[in-house]
Amino acid sequence: EQIEKGGYDHFMLKEIYEQPNAIKDTYRGRLGVKNGIIKMSGIDDNIEKFLNANRIIVVACGTSWHAGLVAEYIFEDLARIPVEVEYASEFRYRNPVITEKDVVIAISQSGETADTLAAIKLAKSKGAFVFGVCNVVGSSIARETHAGAYTHAGPEIGVASTKAFTTQITVLTLIALKLAKETGKINNTDYRYHLQELDLIPQKVVESLKSDSHIQMIADTYKNARNFLYLGRGYNFPVALEGALKLKEISYIHAEGYPAAEMKHGPIALIDEQMPVVVIATKKGHYDKIVSNIQEIKSRKGRIIGVVTEGDTSVKELVDHIIEVPETLESLTPLLTTIPLQLLSYHIAVMLNKNVDQPRNLAKSVTVE
Ligand code: G6P
């Protein structure tokens, strides 16, 4: 097992550090930066299904559901296709309206999650076209779907999902860009710019990982907190949810992810000097609004950890700790802002002596409903 961990203390840490290569493996052979072509046979062979779709319904569970939420932003923003994101377990039991004009995208790392599999079967029985985004080749979901795209992240052993999440977002970004191009909803300059920026992400993830020892210090400061709040807006709202989930899963500290502006309708009541608040405040993406959210937290004495764009000075003055990520397109920020949140939860769990790779009560793949 030590050999399999490749010198890292835990699989989770190894998998966090594998992300630059995993993301590259995900788009290798698909993303043509020079010729401007995105090759994905599962989409190419079924392009009419996507172009004629009334809407896309994403079904997933856990971290994969968070990747689906990021996809909602990117599909609607770039390709202007309406998207609904559903917990598979709710979708399958609530007599959903599904028609032959719907495209369902099922996202699953393991490809074995029982609820997601059942949601796929239901959607198929109503005549929808079902596309899978899976990591495990030949898995049940990969076989049950009409077509799909693998994430090629390599085996993920740590129960808390890390590289599966960022590679799912990568695949979904490729699909969104491809459809945006195909439907003419994106102009060629923007399209080419997105491809170039996506190709720079692995290197920027490497840069983001360099905050590791700084994050370790932040973890040490807050490891005994009883609660954490994670806030983000737009593309980074799902990242806030995912950051909170990571902390809950492996450190057993209660954490909530919230859209920053929604904080005033509830969670703000919890804020005092005992409450660490992680705020994702990258430059593009409602920056001014999030700065005013930070001021609201500060005036209630919350302790703020800001995840910001490299070189940011305004947020720096307001927060207790700052973690920088390189600048990128707003739609690609989740691929970077997720990294420090994974590391923060990892270090807190290690400091609290928790079983990082196999947290209590959780399973890597949930094959029962
Ligand atoms: C379990 C795992 C999570 C995962 C979820 C969905 O809860 O512990 O890490 O996100 O299942 O799994 P899937 O394999 O369908 O992505």
Image: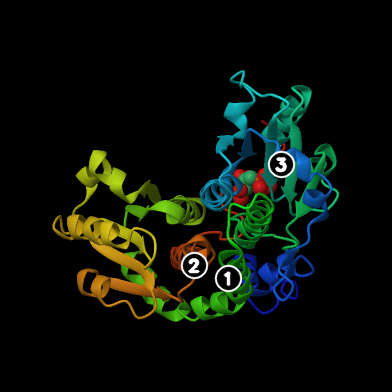
347 or 57, nearer to the observer: 57
| Distance (Cα) linking label 3 and label 1 | 23 Å
Label 1 and label 2: CA atoms lie apart by 9 Å
Vertical placement of 232 versus 81: above or below?
below
Residue type indicated by callout 3: Phe
- Looking at the rendered structure, the secondary structure element under dot 1 is helix
**Residue under the image location 66 percent in, 30 percent down:** 369
Find the residue positioned furthest to the left. 299
Residue located at (75% from left, 37% from top): 130
Identify the image quadrant of residue 366: top right
Q: Which residue has dot 1 on it?
A: 193
Instruction: Give the total of numbered labels.
Output: 3
The mark nearer the N terminus, 3 or 1, is 3
The mark found on residue 50 in the picture is 3
Q: Can residue 112 be seen at all in this image of the molecule?
A: no
Nearer the observer, disc 3 or disc 2?
3
- Residue at position x 74%, y 44% in the image: 132
Q: Is residue 20 visible?
A: yes
Residue 332 image position (x, y, % from top left): 53, 64
Residue 217 is left or right of residue 148, and the answer is: left
Tell me the element at label 2.
loop
Q: Which residue is mark 2?
A: 329
Mark 1 and mark 2 residues within 8 Å of each other at the beta carbon: yes
The CB of the residue at mark 2 lies under 8 Å from ligand 1: no
